[in-house]
Amino acid sequence: MSVQSLNAKKVKKIPEGELLETLNSTKEKGLTTDEAKKRIAQYGPNEIIEKHVRPIVRFLKNFWGPIPWMIEVAAILSAVIGHWADFIVIVVLLLLNAFIDHFQQEKAGKAMAALKKNLATKTRALRNGTWVDIEANQLVPGDIIRIKLGDIIPADVKLMDGEYLQIDQSALTGESLPVTRSQGDIAYSGSIARKGTMTAVVYATGLETFFGNTASLVAKAKTKSHLQKAVVRIGDYLIMLNFVLVIIVLILGYIRQQEIVEVVEFALVLTVASIPVALPTVLSVTMAVGAFKLSKLKAIVNKLVAVEEMAGMDVLCSDKTGTLTQNKLTLNGVFPVSNFSEKDVMFYGALASSPSDNDPIDQAFLGALNDQQKEEISTWTQKHFTPFDPVIKRTEAEVEHQGAIYKTTKGAQQVILDLCSNKEEIKERVDAATQEAANKGDRALAVAKYEDDRWQFVGMAFLSDPPRIDSKDTIQKAAKLGVRVKMITGDQAAIAKTIGDELDIGHNIVQASDLHRLGEAEAARVAIEADGFSEVFPEDKFRIVNLLQHNGHIVGMTGDGVNDAPALKKADAGIAVDGATDAAKSASALVLTLPGLGVIISAIKESRRIFQRMQSYATYRISETIDVLFFSVLAIIFFKAFPVTPIAIILLSVFNDFPIMAISYDKVKYNKKPEIWNMKKISIIGSFLGFTNVIFTFLIFFLGKYVLHFDFSQLQTLVFAELSIAGNLTIFLSRTRGPFYSIAPGKPLVWSTLISKAIISLICGFGLLVTPIGWWVIVVWAYAIIQMLITDRMKLLAYALYEKAWTKKKSNAFKLH
């Protein structure tokens, strides 16, 4: 039978030995490195090649949608009324817009693909008789692999050694509950191991897997970030504003019996100018730049919107082990009971460990054995091993020695104590030793063996996991940024309190079981006030996040295990820490590739910088839209003519918006407090700047008409130059709360603005597509600079008035309470 003809039905029926023979592999040694290389060349890498949209199709999509439709209608109307210059320019600019957007999508796609390479999942495989970690895409048929709690099964496999494996294959089959699989059963690629540990042989990879042959996975629900919601609200505000003013233009055109086609064309072009055409691109570029900066700090952005979500995070629920502590467990001593010795505690604890799973507790026991003990333990054969289960909180092994079968177990002190027949005799001594260890910050792990039809308590080993050197400093930095770190651990309260005191997290540690006895309101109050949570089970983490979110907090959550996945997905910013399982990485928005929380501080700062840039753009865009819309409509009302040509408005939209993409690289100061989208404030400040600019635009219109006596076509160019040059300079006002010079702008923003305005100056000066105004462009520049200086003062006044009104409102609200 050939490897290519293998499928789930056949594999399930084939005996294990025959399958291994067909795959030319062995349980003891697996494949050789050379054989694996040959099979990679034969079968290809173990991955599903994503279906990419053809570039031409993606490019053509830029001409489909509400905004392109309006531009296209404007082009058609220009052709109908014979304005061929307008028609050509509108078409060229439409193509330019499509090319720019297409280029940005291509760039973003390549960037994210490069970042995703860093998220390649690992699997433990038997190569050349040795267990090694390899990338999952390097698996081939015949590989022997180890599957444990939290792994995403990397290929279609037949299970061999091990007691059982509970897997979640809902994404593949739609089954809502995990299913249990044992020796001889099939497990599919893409399933998640929920419980148990087993070895398995790979029989299908890549497109040959059940996953590869399935039409599609269950689609993941798409949620909008706070930023995306804010963008929608900005768009709604501008579109409603435009709708009202365009109706006025159409009514006036009808009353004055103007050429209806020209009125409709102008109304459409005005609408194009009011819609933030570049907003999605600015958003994507800004996020991508932030993601790249974080990738250099060893944090991989799994979901782009997470970069912005972290800006508002005010609570970070952090795992203790491996995140706040070093996750380097060492044995600090042992406590034997009854007739057992310290050597017995170490020996039976090591027997209840698995060398192949790379578990830190198992490694601590195995690593503490001396050479003589290692030689002795090699004469024992481990028949079955049940790895640590976070629900039952212990491991168990069935071992054979000289024909006799024994069982050994190690785990939480109370759990092991409850198993044992001599519980009552030793409980007081065990509890006292456990408490003493906890007071020192040590974790007590109990060991027992099963003999003569009963469990006997052997003793306890004390494990130490000291805090990371940088944890205390990181927590202090988080506090200065307005982010409160709450520790979450499965350890006892005494250990949690010791670590909490050492790290200055706090002493108010709540046992998760205490939350169970409280109603939602009281539980939420306790969760908010707590410095940390101890003896936490997986389901408790989800509830803690939920309680905090329902009380207005934006919550970050760190985790590494499969049982953390629900809480990681529920959190506003789920963060998979270094060494996390594949399931945790998949559920997270941010994946850390270095130990500790230090990178999170950098991520918070960067997210707040991004927030500042987007807020600056939002304020600028509202200001510019109001300037163009209100000036144009008021001029139509009072002067019965279009003050700016349709082609000029199209040029204005392009040359003012697309250079602003450089705001992604702008220099900004991050806020010391969590950010919140205050749309009222943004709208008020943006509108204040916009109406101030409307006054200046009217002023230059009057100067051109009544002082300089420009003819109307020159007057239109003069106004176009002012709207473009002075309007674009508004970005330097909206980007700071203080005077515009209080924070130096980034060079890309300065240069993009200067270059675009230089082009506009040449267009207006030499009369390309508009009536020339010659050297009067220099006067417009001087006017725009004066306008900028005065408007900046008005901005400071607007902020002062807003903050005074806001302070008064909060004061009155306090008095009412």
Image (spheres, rainbow, N blue to C red):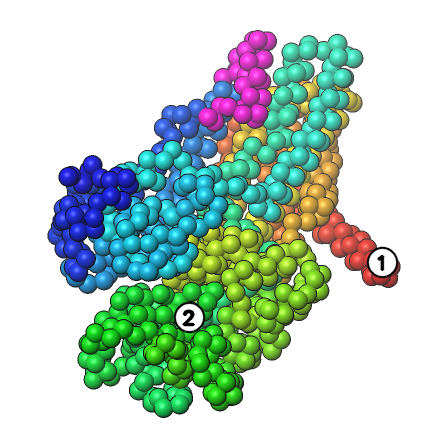
Q: Nearer the viewer, residue 1 or 718?
A: 1
Q: State whether residue 307 appears in this view.
A: no
Residue 213 can be seen in this image: yes
Name the quadrant of the N terminus: top left
The image position of residue 569, as x and y in percent, is 51, 52
> Residues in magenta?
61-88
Q: Position of residue 165 (x, y in %)?
A: 36, 56
* Label whose residue precedes the other's in the sequence (1 or 2): 2
Q: Position of residue 371 (x, y in %)?
A: 21, 83
Determine the secondary structure under disc 1: helix
Q: Which residue sits at x=78%, y=54%?
A: 806
Residue lying furthest right: 816
- Tag 2 residue: 394
Residue beneath label 1, please? 812
Question: In the structure shown, which secondary structural element does the residue marked by tag 2 occupy?
Answer: strand
Work out which residue is located at the far front of the displayed protein and give it: 453
Task: Examine the rendered structure and indicate whether residue 715 appears above or below residue 511.
Answer: above
The stretch drawn in magenta includes residue 65: yes
